Image: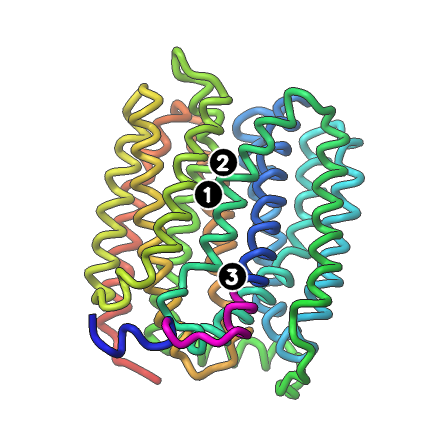
Amino acid sequence: MTAQANTAAPGLEARDWQFLGGFTTLALISGITIGLSKVVTQFFALKIGATPFQIGLIVAMESIGMVLVTVPAGFIIARFGARRVYAIASLGPLLVNLALPFASTWIALAGALLLIGLCIPFRIVSMNSTFLANLPRVGVSKAGWYRAALTGGLSLLGPALANLLVPHIAYGWNFVLIASLFGLMGFGSLFFFGDEAPPEKAALTPGHILTTARNLLRNRDVSESCLLEFTSSATGSLFSAFIIVTAGTIAGLTRADGVSIMLFQGATAVTMLFTGGGLTRGLDKWHGYAIGLISATVALFLLGTVDSFWLLGVGAIFLSIGSAIVHLINMRLLSRHPGEKSQISGLYNLASMSGSVFGAITGGLMTRFTAVQHIYLLWLPLLWLAAAGLFVISRKPVTS
């Protein structure tokens, strides 16, 4: 390992460890809340009679709301600061979750998730931009810590908690717990995020936002990272939206087994993101992207063909390995970009959220003409089409 590769990690000051500890704790609670909400909502949707196609639409509605405001969120945060925006944005999910038990149709449930989706980007971009801004100081070997803590809650602790609560506690009380966690995070953020005066003073007009976004996307690192994040998020959304339903259609497996498979995926992702920053620091980005593509291909083949719980778990593990490597490389590249981090985070999270929409809706449409499990095989051509698109982008002239 070179001296450069060891920069920052051994020399972190107490305030840096305080930042990492506080930030990862907030991200972990956020992940637990979202993971719990996703599983409880899917089971609640099944309870009120939603079909697999309707569940795909329900899952997608939250992401649609996110897509609508993710880029403007980055500019609003640049103007008003992460602290106040995060706290205010936590109130929306709190109130909606208190009303969710009264939803009696899948359309009402989808509408509620759309409202939540309009609030979530302000929280996500606040956290992502704050982490990117501090990453050069704490070291790129920590590039995966934010996503690791978030994923640990989202794909591991949240679903595990849901598996414990749903069979024993009424859905109404589950949603009350979720609402309380949003309130806890909103209150806690007031003591964590800095309250420095943001430098952005340009008018928040659609023209200014679009011009700035186009200029950022002319940078190859930004455009490539956004395309990879879109593809990775879409594939992950396809997995998480339908693995519970898929497990329920396989002889000998149950929906609870689908939740357990999600835990395999989450545990692997957390391990890779916490430990992989140092391992991938010197990895050429194209080698990393190739590893991610091969891992995702193996994962989708297994998820789409096998009927064994353990082999489905192996597929989930391969999926999380590929996604983690791609994310670590993207964060390394974006942390070096000199632009406003909240604006870059807005674009990056737009790619992530629109990928989630695309994955859930496309997967839902696929279930109209094929078995649920086969959608993972049908996803393979789309995955390789995205790889071809990345190759096309890479051939364009480099811009700063």
In the picture of the structure, the residue carrying the numbered disc 1 is: 237
Query: Residue at image x 69%, y 36%?
Result: 109
Tell me which secondary structure the magenta stretch mostly adopts. Answer: helix
Q: CA distance from mark 3 to mark 2?
A: 19 Å
Label 3 Cα neighbours within 10 Å, binned few <14 / some 14-19 / many ≥20 = many
325 or 290, which lies in front?
325
**Residue 229 image position (x, y, % from top left):** 40, 58
C-alpha separation, residue under disc 1 versus residue under disc 3: 14 Å
Q: Residue at x 59, y 62 (%)?
A: 22
User: Residue flagged by tag 1: what amino acid is it?
Assistant: Ser
| The one of 168 and 363 positioned closer to us in this rendering | 168
Quick check: marks 1 and 2 in contact, CB under 8 Å?
A: yes
* The C terminus lies in quadrant: bottom left
Q: Amino acid at mark 2?
A: Ala
Picture coordinates of residue 115, whole percent (x, y): 71, 49
- Stretch in magenta: 10-20
Q: Could you tell whether 285 is left or right of 161 in the image?
A: left
| Few, some or many residues within 10 Å of mark 2 (<14, 14–19, 20+) | many
Q: In the image, is residue 243 above or below residue 251?
A: below
Q: Are marks 1 and 3 in contact (CB under 8 Å)?
A: no
Q: Earlier in the sequence, mark 1 or mark 3?
A: 1
Residue identifier under label 3: 350
Depth check: give the residue in front, 184 or 105.
184
Q: Which residue is mark 2?
A: 241
Identity, as a three-letter code, of the amino acid under mark 3: Leu
Q: Which residue is located at x 30 percent, y 54 percent?
A: 386
Q: Earlier in the sequence, mark 3 or mark 2?
A: 2
Q: Is residue 16 left or right of residue 86?
A: left
**Taking 162 as reference, is 291 left or right?**
left
Local secondary structure at mark 2: helix
Mark 1 residue element:
helix
Q: Is residue 14 magenta?
A: yes
